[in-house]
Amino acid sequence: MRDRGPGDQVSGAYTERVALSQLPPPPERPNPFRMKRRTFLATAAAALATPAQGSDPVVAGTESVDAAFRAWLDGFRKTAISSGLPADLVDRELSGLTPDPRVRGSDRNQPEFSRPFSHYVRRAASEDQAAIGRRRLASLDAGALSRIESERGVPREILGAIWGMESGYGAAMGDQDVIRSMATLAADGRRRAFAEEELLSALRMLASGEVSRNQLVGSWAGAMGQTQFIPSSFLRLAVDGDGDGRRDVWGSAIDALASSANLLSKAGWKRREPWAIEAIAPKGFDYSVCEVLTCPLSQWADLGVSRPGGDGWPDGSVEASLIAPTGAGGPLFLLLANHFVIRRYNNAVTYAVAVGLLADRIAGRPGPVRPWPEETPLSLSDRTGAQTALKSQGFDVGEVDGVMGLKSRQALRAWQKSQGLVADGYLSPDMIARLRSAG
Ligand SMILES: [Ca+2]
């Protein structure tokens, strides 16, 4: 992960794990196998997810933070031992543990400016990145790669793209101690259930003897190795791809890619199906169906949606949903099931679209025919101002938090429709100005 997007950051085996991205700063994404089909980030800053739960942390001075950390640690120690972990191991790993301020910072960081969708995906899926991916894939054992593809059904370019997104093809796996990071997040309260589960899993990895203590390093969100698996995903889904009898997602790229293929395969990857098909909508098209309507390609055709160049659909019965991530003026994508499978890795549209586009490029397929529009980064106050204006006019945006999540995009589409505008749910400076003058 090194180049992650607009709102994601913790990605990786998150959704089945979590990995961290590097491009922008981190919001998050805990939550493994839950997939939200129609949630996607229209604007760059979106993926920030988990709202605060429990106590609002910090604020207080260091002493009370430490006291809160110690109190949590005492309770967790009992939980760990009663879950069956050996007391001597638990005591050895937890004694003397202190919170990691870097994790706190990462967890709370919300960028002032969102990174526009197209800026993110163009950088993540650049020709340079694709060239590195092709070279790195070519350096691996070709027989092992072919075996992974035939056993799991996931093509190597998808695995390569995830590898690139998650760790820069193994170059940046994260150097933060996973036990300390998870303890910090757990004590902090907002992601307690997630972090405690991952911490228990990390301790189980040690208890089993399968990994050594110094392998438990990764992103601030606990994602480890070349394809960034969180501990619970490692335990459930990591596999030995190179046949040496060990699941080494740190030192063996083949193990890491085989593990990712296993994750995707278990999440429902469909063999020989693309992640998306680029689409063109007719004049006067009602974009308010974006993100909310899932129907067969034949029905999209009935609505006037076509493919650039006039190509036919591969199979009209395949279900798809439409997104216009940069508005009606930019590329449109009919997302197929495999896009949502990629979202198990990191539940952010930006991330999954970047993986798809990078994979296409690694495989030598052309990118979108329609050019990306010029996009302007929006400030936090631009975004909260738009949400406030929508809310004051009676549109339900959810929380006014500067994150243009699905609810806010739906509200914007409804407002655009009420104004006779193209209802694409895309927040541009022009739309912000219209919202302000209307409010
Ligand atoms: Ca191995």
Image (tube, grey):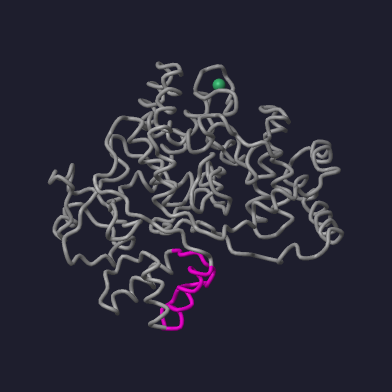
Residue 177 placement, left or right of 357: right
Q: Position of residue 355 (x, y in %)?
A: 41, 41
The residue located at (43%, 68%) in the rendering is 407
In this orientation, which residue lies closer to the viewer: 162 or 246?
Answer: 162
Q: Which quarter of the rendering shows the C terminus?
A: bottom left
In this orientation, which residue lies closer to the viewer: 375 or 328?
Answer: 375
In the rendered image, residue 385 lying in the magenta stretch gets the answer yes
Ligand 1 sits in which quadrant? top right
Q: Which residues are magenta?
A: 381-405
Among the 4 quarters of the image, the one containing residue 70 = bottom right
Residue 421 placement, left or right of 118: left
Q: Is residue 5 above or below residue 288?
A: above
In this orientation, which residue lies closer to the viewer: 24 or 26?
Answer: 24
Q: Give the number of marks.
A: 0
Among the 4 quarters of the image, the one containing residue 116 = bottom left
In the rendered image, residue 202 lying in the magenta stretch gets the answer no
Residue 203 placement, left or right of 342: right
Q: Position of residue 65 (x, y in %)?
A: 81, 59
Q: Is residue 163 above or below residue 40?
A: above
Residue 325 placement, left or right of 223: left
Q: Position of residue 125 (x, y in %)?
A: 40, 39
Q: Position of residue 40 (x, y in %)?
A: 41, 57
The residue located at (50%, 45%) in the rendering is 4
